[in-house]
Each structure stands twice: as C-alpha cells, then as structure tokens.
Image: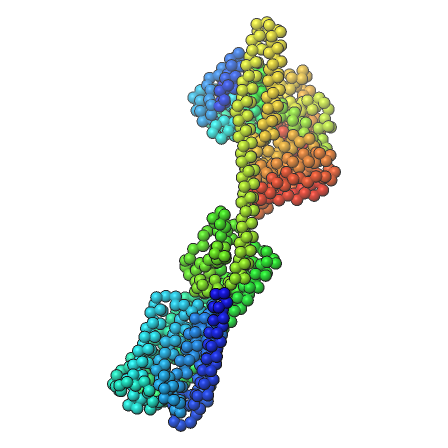
Amino acid sequence: MRVVVADDVMLTREGIVRLLAETDVEVVAEADDAASLVSRVRATRPDAAIVDIRMPPTHTDEGLTAAAAIREEHAEIGVLILSQYIEASYAMRLLEEHPGGVGYLLKERVFDVAVLVDALRRICDGETVVDPTIVSRLFARRRREDPLEELTSREREVLSLVAEGLSNKAIAARLFVSERTVEAHVKQIFLKLSLDANPESHRRVLAVLAYLRAAI
Amino acid sequence: MALALSGSRAWIIRTLLLGSALAYGLAAIVAVPRAGAPLTTYAGASSLAYAADLAAGLALLGAGLLASTEAGARRLGLLALAAGAAWFAPDWDGWDKGPALVRSIGALAIPLFLALLFHLVVSHPGGRLSSRFTRGAVIAAYLAAGLVGVGRALFRDPFLDPYCWRNCLDNSLLVDPQPGLARTLDGIWLGSALALGLLLAAICAGRLLAGSGSARRVLWPVLVPGALAGAAEAAYAVALIRTPLEDPDGAGFASIFIVRSFSVTLAALGVAWSVLRIRRTRAAVSRLAAEVGEAPQPGTLRAALASALGDPSLEVAYWLPDTGRFVDAEGGAVRPPAPGEGRAVTPIVREGLPVATVVHDAALLDGPGVQEEIGAAARLAVENERLQAEVLARLEDLRASRARIIETGDAERRRLERDLHDGAQQRLLALSYELRLARAGEEARGDAGLAREVASAAEEAEAALGELRELAHGIHPAILSEAGLAAALATLAEDAPLPVELGEPTPRRYPPPVETTAYVTVSEAIADAARRGASFVSVELAHEDATLAVTVRDDGAPRGAELVHLEDRLGAVGGSLEAGRTGLRAEIPCG
C-alpha cells in the first residue's frame, strides 16, 4: 500500500513515517501543508493519505478541506484524518461529506502501528473509520432517559463497533461470532432504537453517530 | 466697587432714558395738532391719521424702552427710541404755534427716520449688522439723510419753497437761502428714499426666504412689517416725485401715510415681541438650571436649550479638558463642532474655562446673543451636564477597557492553547512514537524486561498527553474558534457531567468575543447546575435583533451565591445577565 503523510510538525510526521517503515506500507511522499499535500497526491497517486487536521495557514480545519479537495479529484484515494482533539463534529462532517473511504483518528491512536495499518486497509476497502474514543464518549454521554439501557451488553458492544465503522464481517471477526449472528444483533439494535433498518454500511455509521449525538 | 458703580450708572442712564422718552412721547401727544386750518400735519388731516401717527411713534418709543432694559437687545432699543423720536419730526416741523427752533430741528430730522428704520429692521434680531453690504447700506442711508437734512437746514428758506406746506415760515438754522440747491437736495432725497425703501423691502424678503424654519419664526414679526414699511416709503417717494405738492387730505397721500404708520407700528410691535421672546428664553433657560439640577437626565439641557432658543437642530458638545475631546450628553465622542452651512458655533465659558459649545442656526442668533441668552444660571446647568457627560464618557472608556481586557485575555488563551498544541503536545507525541518504536525494537531483540520498561514509559507519556489535551481544552476549546459555537456547545454537552439538552443549533458565526462569552456562559451555567444537584440542563440560543440571547434552565436547588464572574464577563462585552433561582438568561450584543 502506498500513502502520503501530511503534518506540519516534522517530529510527528517523522514518527508516523518511521512507524510505517516497519510495515509493508510505503510512504511515497510527505507534505507539511494542505497545498503541497494536494499536489503530492496528484503526482504520486497513492492509495491513501494520512492528514493532520490542523495545518498552516490558519491551523483550524485545513485537513478536512484538503480531504474534500483530494476526494473530489480522486474518489478512489482514501483519506485518514488525524487530530489531537476528539471532536465528534469533525468526524460527522467528514462522514457527511464523503460516503466511505475516510477515517478520523486521534493521533495517539496510531502509536499502535497495527491500528494505523488496519485503519488504512479499511479505508482503502471503502469502509469508514471512527476513533473508538469518540464512540465511547458518545456512549458515556449522560442522558435523561437512556435508550441504550434497553440494549444487552453484547448489543451495546456491537453498536459501538458499528459506530466505529466496522462492517458486519469485521465485527464478526472481532467478536469471534458468525456474520449471521452480527446481522441479527444489528437488526435487533436498530429495531430497539427505531433506526432505519438495513442502511448501507457507511450510512449506518452516520445514522448511529447522529443518533448517539442527538439522544438526550 | 467698580461693579456697583457701573451698576448705579446704568440705572441712572436707564431712568434718564425712560424719563426723557416718556416726556417726549407726552410732548408729542400734546403738540401734535388736531384737525383745523391751516393743515400742517398728517395728524391734522383726519382722526384716523392722528391715531395712526401717534400709534406708530409711541409704539416705537415703547418698544425701544422695553428693549433698552434687556441686555440682549439694548442696541435695538436705542435704535427704536431714535426712530420713534424721528417719526414725530414732521409733526414738530408742522407745529404751527411752536417755537421756530423746534420746528427747524424737526425739519432737519425728517429724513433721519428712514435711515433709522432701515438700520433697525436690518439689524434685527441681534442689533448687529451681519454683512458688509448691509453695513454699507446703513452708512449710506445715514449719510444721505444727514447731508439732505443739514443741507436743507442751511440753504432752504421755506418761504421761498413753492411746495412748502408744513412750515412755510420758520427756519432758524438758515444760513443762505438758495432755492435751487434746496430743490436739488429734495430731489436727491426722494431718489435716496425710493432706493432705500426698495432695498429694505428686498433685504427683508430675502432674509425671510433664505432663513431656516426656526430662523423665520424669530424674524418674521419684524421683517414682514419691515418689508411693508420699505415698500410704503418707496411709494411715498414715488408719490412726491410725481406730485411735488404734498396733500395730506388727498386720497393717495393719506392712504400712503396710513400704510406707513401701520407698518411701522407693526415693526415696533415685532421688536417688542422679540424682546419678550428673549426674556422668555432667559426665564426658560434659568428654570433649566433648577431642572437639570433635579433630574440629571442626559440630553435634558440640549432639548431645553433647543426649545428655549427655538432651534430644534441645536446641538451641545461638551469639552473634556482631561482627554482633550468633545462628547455629547451621553458621553459618546463627537466631532469637534465647526461652523458651516448656516451653522454658528458659540462657546460657553465659565470662570474663564470653556465648558461646552453650542452649535445653532446662524440666522437665528449671533454668538454673543446666545451667550447672553444662556445667562449665568444656565452656564451652571451646562457645567453640571458637562460633568455628567464626563462621567458617562469615563464609564464608556471603562467599558471599552474592560472589553479590551477580556479580549486580550481570550486572545492570550487562544495563543496559549495553540502553543501547547504546536509545542509540548507535538513533542510528547513524537516521544510516544519513539518509545513505541523502541519497545518494538527491544521485543524483536528479545529483551522482554527492557521492552516492559519502555512500554510503561510510553504509557506515562500517553497519560501526560491526555492530561495536556484536557488542560489545553480547558484553556481554550479549539473547536470554538475552528467550527463555531454550535459545534463547541455540542462537545460541551457530550462531556457534561449531567444531561444537557441543546435547542436548535445556530449555524451562524459571531465575532470571537461573542462566541467565547456565550460559550463561557453555557459552560459556567452547566457547572453551576451540576453543583446545585440538577438532573438536567436545557440550553437555548436565540438571535434577537442585534443580540444573542442565551437561556439556560435546570432543575437544581435554588442558587445561593450570585454568578459574579459571569456578570463581569457579560458586562465587559456590554451584555447583561438575569439570573433567577435556578436558570439564567444572558444577552450578548453582537452588532
């Protein structure tokens, strides 16, 4: 797999590059701002781009804007956004703008190179990746009447993996159960939360996140 | 001492003036001949003419007396007295049983009336001549009247005048009878009278048309009769040019006399009215001092001065010597007052120091007039209001300075957060990557002990990273400046220790101080509700006119302490906080 890494801070960019050096992921280019990222992507045509959300010149959400620019030119290139902050708003915005092939992870998450490589693979397969911290925070949110209490603990486990962007197959592998069992769980969960049953995988991530954010 | 002396001298002069004017008026009443032959005056021609003659002269004398007692109208008063005296000059001339010298002086003074009337009307209301043109015209009028009056006195022998009718006998001042020269002087005078009459009418009409509404209200009582009087004088001159032998009994001359008397009477009443207006103004402005003292409502003085002086567009600017600028009554900065486009600027000085500047209609009053009308009592009021304006200006400065302090603090926090993000957090991240790599290396080399130690160091580093992130978020939530209030409040609600219900999100962005203040308000309200054991909090944002209203409700126990910090914060941006027993409502102005 070929990737481009974009981060304006050399130390962290180098850290990611060195982590990936131990794997079969090849870093074909590095960039330190959104503009050079877009031009490197155009030149090298990688499978995915790892992008820091905060980059020059305004240090706000350049990463998201760059992601939109890359996806518009090359819909097949996946984008993994890295952030030092866990902001559900950003994850939602990313998911709303791009159906599949995108991810949003906390920078610390990718210390574990296995997590990083797994996220890149899933993105390249057109899946969605949402940082588990975001999901667990949304689960932990205080609610007046918690609809999640109606779920069994296994169902909650499945729901959080759905929210992280995992496919039924991946969830089955993670929980050591059959894909069919996962499908049954998902159906039951959606019924209990009165969510639109059986949306396609990307849209179901969005639906679950929106549900978790809105439920009070 | 000097003051007392000058005061008593003024009193003596005033008494003398009053006495002589009264005596003169009485003399005129007694002396003016009643109907009977031979006809030597208009007053003798009919009782209507008699009444009109007396009314005009006495009105002028009365208006003059009234005006000469009023500080702002003394010049007008003297002019009116002189004009009243001159009005009776033809009657003295035609006093057939009177002393020759009185008749001769009367004849000499006849032309002076028109010059005095001209001067009186064009110098209304301030008693001063506003332009070089009117000054020149007045001087020319006096010169013509003086030259003709004195010339006729020296060279006209009434006995030799074929058109004489008032007085065909006496001229005590005669030096050398020259009938031809006398006729020429008569001709010169008639030409001058015609020109002066027309000019007077034109000046009056012009000033009435050019003046503003408020100026017109002050000017018309004198200028309208003034224009009529000018026209009547011109008609009189034309009649005499066409019919040199004046016949007070003839319909033409008689009616011209009635119109002249009538318009002069009206003009005199107009002068009296304007004197009374000045007096009323002074009384109103003096009352003002007490009112302003009792009810210190900013702007009272301006409104009161405007109505007292009859100029609704009047402005008052207060001078703040400390900061060297002008402010309005509310303390807001205003541009330094400057004269222009029919506006005049009058400084109000108290104890030698400028306290305020009044900008008013230039046609309405001249500068010294305003100064006099405002008077010493009102100057105290002006000073009071200036002090008040100064306090308000200081308050405004203070508010601006509070806002600046808050804004600087916010900017500093933003900078600190960014420094943490770009500095310490990045280094810790890099360190964590290194430790991960080192651990993987040790594991590969088979040094399980070292690998464990490195792993625990990595965990420490990641814990530090997590704490640092919380700290940075506490200093300033990056999401607020990056994605706006709605996103930041959503995050706040997710992290809250109790259920937080957010109303309709507001997608629009506000200036940073507004967003930060709203965020801080909600954040503090949630923390406060949690402290009071609330089980939920609801937050509503509403954009009303130019205000962002934040309403927070909760079901916690009643609040013990006030939210002083929040009040300060809102006050600094010009907002307000209404805190009930549980909920609160904050209003933040957002331009």
Displayed quadrant of residue B456:
top right
Q: Residue at x 47, y 25 (%)?
A: A33
* Viewer can see residue B319: yes
| Percent x, y of residue B84 | 43, 79
Q: Quadrant of the C terminus of chain B?
A: top right
Whether residue B580 sits left or right of residue B61 in the image: it is right
Whether residue A18 sits left or right of residue B199 in the image: it is right
Q: Residue at x 55, y 58 (%)?
A: B381
Q: Residue furthest top?
A: B446
Displayed quadrant of residue B96:
bottom left
Displayed quadrant of residue B76:
bottom left
State the residue in front, B207 or A33: B207
**How many numbered badges does the structure rendering display?**
0
| Percent x, y of residue B120 | 41, 73
| Percent x, y of residue B514 | 57, 40
Q: Residue at x 68, y 36 (%)?
A: B528
Q: Residue furthest right?
A: B557
| Percent x, y of residue A84 | 56, 24
Q: Residue furthest front?
A: B1
Colour approach in the figure: rainbow
Whether residue B69 sits left or right of residue B144 in the image: it is right
Eyeballing the image, is B329 above or below B425? below
* Viewer can see residue A94: no
Whether residue B472 sits left or right of residue B497 in the image: it is left
State the residue in front, B254 or B31: B31
Q: Residue at x 46, y 17 (%)?
A: A28
